[in-house]
Image (cartoon, rainbow, N blue to C red):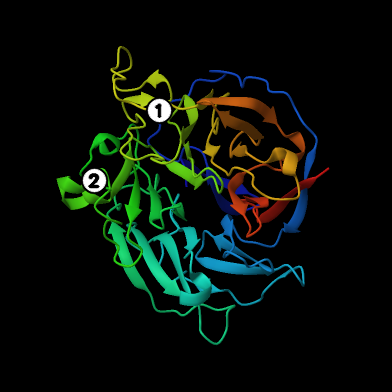
Amino acid sequence: MATIRSLLIAGVVLVGIGCLSGCSPIEPDQGSLPPLPPSNDLQLQTISTSLNSPVFMTAPAGDTTRLFIVEKGGLIRIFNRNSSSLLPTAFLNLSGLISTAGERGLLGMAFDSNYAANRRFYVLYTNTTGDIVIARYLRSAPDDNLADSSATVLLTVEHSAESNHNGGMLAFGPDGCLYAGVGDGGGSGDPNNNGQTIGTRLGKILRINSDTGGPCNNSNPFFVFGGDAQLVWSFGLRNPWRFSFDRVTNDLYIGDVGQGAREEINVSPAPNAGRGLNFGWGVMEGTLCFSPASNCDSTGLTLPELEYPHVGSGCSGSVTGGYVYRGQAMRSLSGTYFYADFCLGFVRSFRFQNGQAIEQTEWPLLSPSGGSITSFGEDAAGELYITTIRGGLFKFIPN
């Protein structure tokens, strides 16, 4: 997940977003967060605190009774909203197939847009050798609270050298293609220049045909290059820890974790929504030169709509990308994009308008006790949630 640091808490090793290995030395007090106007109009409703390192939450279209929670250790759990309880049996158990070292694990899940009819859903995990796998599973025909154990592997991305920067997000785009976020391969400073190399799947957002695992169609921007480049949609990413498409505008929002100085949010408007864009890593970290450290050439690079500095030493910043709110419970916030930081514990928001991040706001009551926000989640109605590494799932509600 993003850049992840092992945390020893209450005698249990928990994995959170920070710097696990090979990161640049961080000097204390290197920056301070720009203060934002606070709002207490939202608060958290506790859904569950009994999960095991949850890293994502989602729901099938039209399913208002269940929430599906992805646990890093390999389980997908179901929370039944009618009974307000976790089902005792996991929807799917992949614990025997995965490595959970460092940032590895079961990291992402997406339901097919026609899930109710075809029973298909997709997962992204790191296998026992550390490679990234995207696989298709089916919901059980007789029991919609269970998945069949057999799978169709669509794609495997070699990633065995380092345990960090696996990405992990899966999402269907408005074009019906399956998009996948993949980190740069790990280590410090992208030593193999994967982010800027079109012919590798690392450091990219990939656009995939969910039937075949190949390119979604020949409109992928580097299709004519052949090979791995055929799958590449966007490049120049370090570790895109959660991206999403706005349900109304189809704009693409990407939270990309920085190295030692900057965290960033990239926004790419529809209809292209990231097509062929170079987001700059590892030439640049946010709007700062990275390699070279000065006088870098930013020609042709797409710089972030929003960035913020690391603060202090240790786990000093690690962005968690979120969603544009499109629910019904808080209609005045429609069009507001929420994001968080695993290390710093905040939840913040902005609106994207005329190419700018406006109405930037901090939400103190959405910062859970202990912080460590691993992901946002969105239910079938567009309401928002967060998960925390210590086992929590919380819903945004009006205060």
Q: Residue at x 59, y 38 (%)?
A: 339
319 sits left or right of 395 in the view: left
Q: Nearer the viewer, residue 273 or 19?
A: 273
Q: Please state the horizontal and vertical placement of residue 295, each as a whole percent of the image.
A: 30, 12
Q: Distance between the Cα atoms at labels 1 and 2?
A: 24 Å
Q: Please state the horizontal and vertical placement of residue 79, each as a whole percent of the image.
A: 67, 67
Q: Nearer the viewer, residue 196 or 268?
A: 268
Q: Please state the horizontal and vertical placement of residue 255, each as a whole percent of the image.
A: 49, 38
Q: Nearer the viewer, residue 371 or 288?
A: 288
On the image, numbered disc 2 is attached to which residue? 200
**Residue furthest out toward the top:** 295
Q: Earlier in the sequence, mark 1 or mark 2?
A: 1
Q: Residue at x 33, y 35 (%)?
A: 277
Circle 2 SS class: loop
Residue type at mark 1 is: Ser
Circle 1 SS class: loop
Q: State whether residue 332 appears in this view.
A: yes
Above or below: residue 180 compared with residue 356: below
Figure disc tally = 2
**Residue furthest out toward the bottom:** 142
- Which quadrant holds residue 391? bottom right
Q: Please state the horizontal and vertical placement of residue 367, each as a whole percent of the image.
A: 71, 40
Residue type at mark 2 is: Thr
Above or below: residue 340 compared with residue 394: above
Q: Residues within 10 Å of mark 2 (few under 14, many from 20)?
A: many
144 sits left or right of 161 in the view: right
Q: Quadrant of the C terminus?
A: top right
Above or below: residue 344 compared with residue 240: above
Disc sitting over residue 315 in the figure: none
Disc sitting over residue 24 in the figure: 1
